[in-house]
């Protein structure tokens, strides 16, 4: 069975880095058909256009292996909106926000115009959660409730500091999905039991995590084969199709 990795980074950043060929090799070794790629740390925080152009070029070079989510920093205001529109027009498939790297709390007013624009463009929004004080699951629930027509992925499922808020935030807001990176298999299995495999998505957050290890977790989950296929492939494929992939 082939998988879709819903979130990984390419490019060489300050904290970590992975070039395209290394990612492709690891995808091949671990049965990953398609990876959603986002830029490196500095590009997420500051150099948005540079990072977005880099991942977009990779999707043009490897259209059957990579899908790109762009990133914009809401602090850039109108410039962020223009960059988001440019990326959507070029065929990029979603938006990545990182409250810690980009320096805001998710519920702050500066974030909402960017979220509103992404929702209007039909783009799913991936938001890293779990790190105090910026990335709180309940703050994501607040934003998701403001835009019920939007689609949100709760990156890292609240790991590590706000796992206890992650489940109620998803139960409260039906337009939030969660990804599997960083979390124990028991936490993922609990999510499947509480709100269904159809809202759980496989990701590796490589190179910060091991693709082999995260794929191994997916294979070892105590779920049905249908649920494993939903988590590992079907759910993200539907979101990408909704976003124009």
Image (cartoon, grey):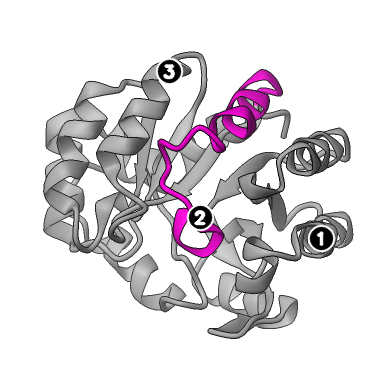
Region in magenta = 98-122
Between residues 103 and 70, which one lies in front from this camera angle? 103
Q: Which mark is on residue 106?
A: none
Nearest to N terminus: mark 2 or mark 3: 2
User: Is residue 1 at all visible to an observer of this figure?
Assistant: no
Q: Which of marks 3 and 1 is nearer the N terminus?
A: 1
User: Would you say 93 lies left or right of 100 here?
Assistant: right
**Residue 15, horizontal then vertical, whole percent:** 53, 84
Measuring from the top left, give residue 118's x and y in whole percent.
65, 29
Q: Could one spot residue 78 in this view of the protein?
A: yes
Quarter of the figure that contains the C terminus: top right
**Marks 2/3: CA–CA distance:** 19 Å
Drawn side of residue 8 relative to residue 47, left or right? left
Position of 176 relative to 219 (above/below): above
Q: Around disc 2, counting alpha carbons within 10 Å, would you say few (fewer than 14), some (14 to 19), or many (20 or more)?
A: many
| Residue 94 drawn at (x, y percent) | 65, 40
Q: Are marks 2 and 1 in contact (CB under 8 Å)?
A: no
| Res. 98 mark | 2
Residue 216, image x, y percentages: 32, 70
Q: Is mark 3 on a helix, strand or loop?
A: helix
- Numbered circle sitting on residue 62: 1
Q: What element carries label 1?
A: loop
Label 3 belongs to which residue? 146
Q: Which of 117 and 192 is in front in this view?
A: 117
- What residue appears at the point 16 percent right and 43 percent down from the top-left corner? 165
Q: Residue furthest top?
A: 149
């Amino acid at each position: 069975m082939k998988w879709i990795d819903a979130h990984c980074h390419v490019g060489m950043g300050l904290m970590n880095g992975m070039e395209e060929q290394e990612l492709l090799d690891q995808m091949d070794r671990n049965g990953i058909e398609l990876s959603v790629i986002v830029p490196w740390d500095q590009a997420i925080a500051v150099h948005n256009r540079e990072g977005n152009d880099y991942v977009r070029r990779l999707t043009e070079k490897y259209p059957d292996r990579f899908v790109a989510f762009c990133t914009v920093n809401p602090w850039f205001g109108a410039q962020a909106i223009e960059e988001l529109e440019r990326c959507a027009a070029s065929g990029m498939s979603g938006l990545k926000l990182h409250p810690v790297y980009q320096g805001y709390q998710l519920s702050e007013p500066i974030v909402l115009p960017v979220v509103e624009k992404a929702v209007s463009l039909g783009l799913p929004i991936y938001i890293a959660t779990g790190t105090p004080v910026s990335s709180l699951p309940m703050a994501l629930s607040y934003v998701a409730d403001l835009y019920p027509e939007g689609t949100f992925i709760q990156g890292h499922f609240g790991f590590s500091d706000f796992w206890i808020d992650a489940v109620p935030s998803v139960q409260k807001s039906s337009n939030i999905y969660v990804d599997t990176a960083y979390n124990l298999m028991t936490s993922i299995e609990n999510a499947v039991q509480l709100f269904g495999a159809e809202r759980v998505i496989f990701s590796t957050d490589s190179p910060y995590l091991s693709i082999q290890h995260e794929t191994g977790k997916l294979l070892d989950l105590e779920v049905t084969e249908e649920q494993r296929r939903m988590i590992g492939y079907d759910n993200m494929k539907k979101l990408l199709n909704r976003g124009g992939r």
